[in-house]
Image: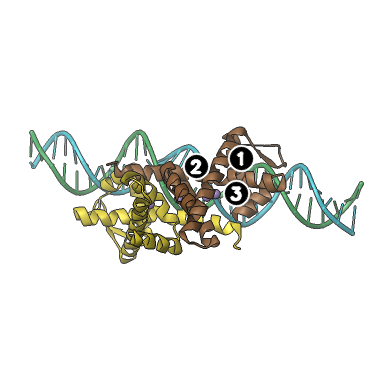
Chain colours: A brown, B yellow, C green, D cyan
DNA sequence: CAGAAAATGTAGCCATAGCTATATTTATTA
DNA sequence: TAATAAATATAGCTATGGCTACATTTTCTG
């Protein structure tokens, strides 16, 4: 049996990356739907202040997930795209799983946004199987 | 349909309380199994430095979840007990649900530790039903 | 095209949760 | 019981992600 502390440290680890994942997934969506991802739209979608979005985008830029010129909209690097598409795939599996469990769209949507970051590959596979059999 | 930002703000909200929930649940376990909850054991169980555990316990104390005398072990207030027992109940439902989904104990244990904080009452009920029918 | 509005950026604040190093207190044991 | 070990506490640092207020730049519009 694994050490108890392992579970907690995995959760802490997930929390380090989840904001990044949500940002990148969202930027990809905005690029897809509107052709560009702007700070205003990111802030509005996440329900946070524009200054907060701007600061986080700065971090994502220095970490190489995102590119931008001053006062211009935001684009994903290759590294950023990869995480965005993986996150989107995972998000959809979790969302559909919750629907298949019998939940309404709103609840499935809300819960998926948090659960997605704490689902291991094994669990994701079980959810995907469950979705297929429904 | 709900606003997209609602999901994100609920997740942010969950993250404000989840460390508290894990601490209180753990303290209850330690009180139950060892008769007392000490900083060393909390730090060891969570896999963090003792100084970090001590600081968080200070916050829990000022927030009224926990009582302690200097250099002595930690006890739950009534407010703290309530959250501990609710958290434990919820944790067990999620853990058993993952087992019933077909996961091994280690994976179920690891994923439950994160997922538990992002499961609404509605979703929890669905999981509980699923457990009953298995 | 000038002025107003909108978007972006910066500064400075707060809270949380990590860490290491060190001080203090309590507990063990020789 | 005195010395040592263990546990607790404190100080000071980092990183993250919130916020408001304000500065700057871009965009819109009359
Ligand atoms: Mn999410
Ligand atoms: Mn997502
Ligand atoms: Mn947990
Ligand atoms: Mn989480």
The residue labelled by disc 2 is: A17
Say above or below: B102 vs B67.
Answer: above
Instruction: Indicate left or right for B58 with D25 as reference.
Output: left
Residue name at image x 26 percent, y 53 percent: B70
Chain-order first, disc 1 or disc 2: 2
Asked if the residue at tag 2 contacts the one at tag 3, i.e. Cβ–Cβ closer than 8 Å, the answer is: no
Element type at mark 3:
helix
Element type at mark 2:
helix
Chain-order first, disc 1 or disc 3: 3
Mark 1 neighbour density, 10 Å: few (under 14) some (14–19) many (20 or more): some
| Viewer-nearest of discs 1 and 2 | 2
Q: Give percent across and percent down for residue B17.
A: 43, 56
Q: How far apart are the two marked residues, 1 and 3, measured between alpha carbons?
A: 10 Å
Element type at mark 1:
helix
Q: Give percent across and percent down for residue B90.
A: 36, 59
Q: Give percent across and percent down for residue C13.
A: 54, 51
Q: Is the distance from the Cβ of mark 3 to the nearest ligand 1 atom less than 8 Å?
A: no
């Amino acid at each position: 049996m694994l050490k108890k502390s392992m579970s907690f440290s995995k959760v802490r680890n997930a929390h380090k990356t989840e904001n990044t994942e949500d940002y990148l997934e969202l930027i990809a969506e905005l690029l897809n739907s509107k052709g560009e991802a702007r700070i205003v739209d990111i802030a509005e979608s996440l329900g946070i202040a524009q200054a907060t979005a701007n600061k986080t985008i700065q971090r994502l830029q220095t970490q190489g997930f995102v590119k931008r010129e001053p006062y211009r909209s935001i684009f994903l690097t290759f590294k950023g795209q990869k995480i965005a598409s993986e996150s989107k795939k995972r998000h959809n599996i979790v969302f559909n799983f919750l629907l298949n469990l019998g939940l309404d769209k709103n609840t499935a949507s809300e819960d998926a946004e948090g659960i997605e970051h704490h689902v291991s590959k094994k669990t994701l596979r079980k959810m995907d199987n469950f979705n297929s059999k429904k």
